[in-house]
Image: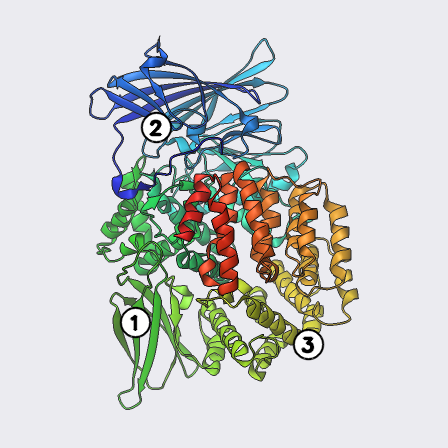
């Protein structure tokens, strides 16, 4: 690292309101790749009305001059450190002007002002504005921004910033000067600037109250047609938020810019979203059904932030879940309404059970409102986002849709235009519903995954069924002592073909619930995954199969199948320590046979039920993960299903003929089931023609990729041939090529180590581009457990080298990549040693704060 930053963690309990605030900001950028000139003018006000010392945040900035109320200051009037500009004796009211020089071209961290394929763009969340100018770079300082951009008119015809364009003038030297004014006061993290030469797709939206909003999508030249779906998604999201929450858009223009160089998915800058291009661009040839789905959901997410995040923002970064948990919940509700509620819920449950439970079990465990942070970028986590959304969902479950809406209305009534805390949100929910949510608030303080143990008793004489429940949250790395939480537990009692639904509220460590029944029912517990906990209940195979058939709740039906597979995995491990020879029970084949002969009405749901759980779903059940045994067992399960039901897969596949592609729910469902059939058929001998046929004849990326995935999973000989055809067809198109990078890196056989080297030498690979790096190495550790955990430790070493290399280029990307190395405690001793050695070696290096925080925690 060029600059050694202080390793001082910040604490939530140390929060202090700012002594000075900035009410108005005027920024003037004269763009230049290596020497952009910025003049920043701030109107400052002291909160107490007294003079004092002003401390501004700033990093890696070249400060040219400072003026106070029009007077140039001598350098001895202020102090510049690696992270601050300190100005003593600042009057209670003042105008401060800074002149700064920036080098966007050298910015590979992609925070602050940088270049993406020649276009200027900014990324300021969380603390990136301080890489543009010295500022009170904290979300509780809200200012009105005016932005001037001056740049060459032919090279950069699009000059964009937040708010409304108020003037545009061509200067005599061929440069253009534009001025944007954002009427809504905002924190610096929502500032954005973009300058480039794009194609622009235009549309419009008329709000419920009749205001016309211009919608503009800026994309790389030639990609205009690929933005159509994103534009329509935005229109759907705008309408949905009006109908569901009564929330309308508030500016006259909404712009989205798609860039290929981006650290995250997308960013909700006021009126000017910046998106990773993979979440904007799609057409049937180049994008899969999943890509279309993600685009709609992320377009929705960023749009919904305009109210939950922008109009009401966070007081400090510890409150990140205030905007992210709530906005993820909102985008999930939107997606559920646009498609299948059950399938969406299943996806969310998978995320929690894999990534989020793993985070709780690892060295970075934290509550949805973290208490201590060294590098804020490390806390854009599945816990803050997805568990945060689960916490909001529990409120929704407890209060009902109408009660939740009342709470939202009160929240906006009280806090529009403010920077607030998670407590303010819960208080609004509480006050609007006249309900004490004190106990519920523990979800914000306590980390870890609660375990819910349930026993049942049936008394035939008394005609009484009892559920005895116990909750316990094991200690986490960050927090030893845990208290009982408020758990909404949805239950169905299945008896005599009927299902009775209940919503239980568990508030104590132990509790008993009784039900008057005439017959012993099968309890469906935690329907809809009503709380983010691990459930333990001794179900028999028969009971699980009954739930899978008869429960009302689709998530519970799917979950019963998941539990069946968990039982199979444990049985396989017991039967044979290699996991290979265990035979699946006949009842399971029979259940699958019936499903295949007579698929359910919802084909996508059928496809889910027919899928053997992924490695990470299964692994999460083990304190110590038996990697190789799991990999072998899961492979063997798929092989057995494929062989035993070969004829049924084939018949089902043939019954689902492809039709002209549309991204439309029934078609998506049909393709999903076809892909599952194809997956198993790749494990059966003699299906080369069928695989080749689908690859060559399909009119869409979903069906083509299904062939490549199936061949990859079955290590099918066709894989190499089809992959090389795919590379030839798509090597000019980086977004599509990323799919090829990922497939190559997830091939589950040893040649993959050579492949990884070849991939990074590919002309389209770039260490500077996070999408490329993630496509290769993200896929390697997420989708290739057999090779990532290879016995000789090669996979660990490989990833560690990449992490160190990336840390010098882009610390945020490095810090996300390092995650799978941190959980060394969860592996058997040989792997523990290898992982620890790799982490210890890392710690001897000069690491970024991002990486240091994670690696040091994992070793402490
Ligand atoms: N706030 C963005 C979102 O959730 C995520 C993000 C965080 C993007 C930090 C960039 C940097 O929508
Ligand atoms: Zn968000």
The x and y percentages for residue 179 are: 48, 19
Residue at left offset 56%, top offset 20%: 32
Residue closer to the observer: 491 or 446: 446
How dense is the environment of label 2, judged by Cα within 10 Å: few (below 14), some, or many (20 and up)? many
Circle number at residue 470: 1
Relative to 516, is 324 on the left or the right? right
756 in relation to 34, above or below: below
Q: In this view, does 803 lie above or below 177?
A: below
The reply to whether dot 1 and dot 3 touch (C-beta < 8 Å) is no
Name the residue tied to disc 3.
643
Residue 593 visible? The answer is yes
* Residue furthest bottom in the image: 461
Tell which circle, 1 or 2, labels the residue nearer the N-terminal end: 2
Does 405 appear above or below 671?
above
| Side of 432 where 656 appears, left or right | right
- Please count the marks in the image: 3
Residue in the foreground of this view, choosing between 76 and 670: 76
- As helix, strand or loop, the secondary structure at mark 1 comes to strand
Left or right of residue 815: residue 431: left
Label 3 crowd bin: few (<14), some (14–19), many (20+), radius 10 Å: some
Q: Which mark is residue 692?
A: none
In the displayed structure, 559 sits above or below 1; it is below
Could you tell which of marks 3 and 2 lies nearer the N-terminus? 2
**Residue closest to the far right:** 689
**Horizontally, is 497 left or right of 155 in the view?**
left
The picture places residue 91, in percent across and down from the top left corner, at: 25, 17
- Within 8 Å: ligand 1 and the Cβ of disc 3? no
Q: How is the image coloured?
A: rainbow
């Amino acid at each position: 690292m060029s600059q050694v930053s202080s390793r001082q963690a910040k604490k939530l309990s140390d929060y202090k309101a700012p002594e000075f605030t900035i009410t108005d900001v005027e920024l003037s950028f004269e763009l230049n790749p290596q020497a952009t000139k910025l003049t920043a003018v701030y109107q400052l006000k002291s909160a107490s009305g007294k003079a004092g010392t002003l401390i501004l945040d700033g990093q890696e900035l070249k400060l040219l001059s400072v003026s106070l109320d029009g007077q140039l200051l001598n350098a001895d009037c202020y102090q510049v450190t690696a992270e601050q500009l300190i100005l003593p004796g600042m009057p209670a009211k003042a105008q401060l002007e800074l002149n700064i020089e920036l080098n966007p071209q050298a910015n590979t961290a992609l925070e602050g002002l940088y270049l993406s394929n020649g276009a200027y763009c900014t990324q300021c969340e969380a603390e990136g504005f301080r890489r543009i100018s010295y500022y009170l770079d904290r979300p509780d300082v809200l200012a009105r921004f005016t932005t001037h951009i001056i740049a060459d008119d032919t090279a950069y015809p699009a000059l964009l910033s937040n708010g409304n364009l108020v003037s545009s003038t061509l200067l005599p030297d061929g440069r253009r000067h534009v001025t944007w004014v954002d009427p809504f006061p905002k924190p610096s993290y929502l500032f954005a600037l973009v300058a480039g030469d794009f194609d622009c797709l235009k549309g419009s939206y008329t709000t419920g109250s009749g205001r016309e909003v211009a919608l503009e999508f800026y994309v790389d030249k030639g990609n205009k047609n690929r933005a159509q779906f994103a534009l329509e998604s935005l229109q759907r999201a705008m309408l949905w938020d009006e109908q569901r929450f009564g929330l309308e858009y508030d500016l006259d223009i909404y712009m989205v810019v798609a860039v290929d160089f981006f650290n995250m998915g997308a960013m909700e800058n006021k009126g000017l979203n910046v998106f990773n291009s993979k979440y904007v661009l799609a057409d049937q040839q180049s994008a899969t059904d999943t890509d279309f789905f993600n685009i709609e959901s992320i377009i929705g997410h960023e749009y919904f932030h305009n109210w939950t995040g922008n109009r009401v923002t966070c007081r400090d970064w510890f409150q990140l879940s205030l905007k992210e948990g709530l906005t993820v919940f909102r985008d999930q509700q939107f997606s559920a309404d646009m498609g299948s509620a059950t399938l969406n819920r299943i996806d969310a449950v998978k995320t929690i059970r894999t990534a989020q439970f793993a985070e709780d079990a690892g060295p970075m465990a934290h509550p949805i409102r973290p208490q201590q942070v060294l590098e804020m970028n490390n806390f854009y986590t599945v816990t803050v986002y997805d568990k945060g959304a689960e916490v909001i969902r529990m409120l929704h479950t407890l209060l009902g849709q109408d009660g939740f809406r009342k709470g939202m209305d009160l929240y906006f009534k009280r806090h529009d235009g403010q920077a607030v805390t998670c407590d303010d949100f819960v208080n609004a929910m509480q006050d609007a519903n006249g309900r004490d949510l004190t106990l519920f608030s523990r979800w914000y303080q306590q980390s870890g995954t609660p375990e819910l143990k349930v026993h049942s008793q049936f008394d035939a004489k008394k005609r009484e069924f009892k559920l005895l429940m116990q909750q316990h949250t094991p200690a986490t790395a960050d927090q030893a002592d845990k208290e009982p939480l408020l758990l909404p537990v949805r239950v169905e009692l299945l008896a005599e073909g009927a299902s009775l639904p209940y919503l239980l509220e568990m508030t104590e460590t132990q509790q008993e619930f009784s039900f008057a029944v005439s017959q012993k029912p099968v309890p469906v517990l935690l329907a809809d995954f009503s709380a983010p906990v691990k459930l333990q209940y001794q179900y028999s195979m028969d009971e699980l199969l009954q739930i899978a058939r008869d429960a009302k709740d689709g998530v519970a039906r799917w979950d019963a199948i998941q539990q069946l597979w968990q039982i199979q995995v444990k049985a396989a491990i017991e039967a044979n320590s290699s996991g290979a020879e265990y035979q699946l029970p006949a009842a399971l084949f029979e259940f699958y046979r019936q499903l295949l002969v007579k698929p359910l009405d919802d084909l996508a749901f059928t496809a889910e039920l027919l899928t053997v759980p992924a490695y990470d779903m299964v692994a999460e059940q083990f304190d110590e993960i038996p990697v190789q045994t799991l990999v072998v067992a899961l492979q063997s399960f798929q092989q057995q299903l494929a062989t035993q039901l070969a004829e049924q897969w084939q018949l089902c596949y043939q019954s689902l003929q492809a039709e002209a592609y549309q991204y439309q729910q029934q078609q998506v469902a049909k393709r999903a089931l076809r892909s599952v059939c194809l997956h198993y058929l790749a494990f059966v001998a003699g299906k080369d023609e069928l695989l080749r046929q689908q690859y060559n004849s399909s009119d869409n990326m979903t069906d083509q990729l299904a062939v490549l995935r199936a061949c990859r999973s079955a290590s099918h000989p066709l894989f190499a041939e089809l992959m090389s055809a795919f590379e030839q067809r798509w090597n000019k198109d980086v977004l599509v090529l990323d799919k090829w990078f990922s497939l190559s890196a997830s091939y589950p056989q040893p040649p993959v180590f050579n492949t990884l080297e070849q991939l990074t030498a590919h002309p389209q690979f770039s260490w500077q581009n996070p999408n490329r790096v993630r496509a290769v190495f993200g896929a390697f550790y997420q989708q290739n457990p057999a090779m990532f955990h290879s016995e000789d430790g090669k996979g660990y070493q490989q990833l560690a080298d990449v992490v160190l290399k990336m840390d010098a280029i882009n610390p945020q990307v490095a810090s996300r990549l390092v995650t799978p190395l941190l959980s060394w405690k969860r592996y058997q001793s040989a792997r523990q040693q290898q992982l620890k050695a790799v982490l210890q070696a890392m710690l001897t290096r000069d690491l970024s704060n991002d990486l240091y925080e994670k690696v040091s925690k994992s070793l402490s």
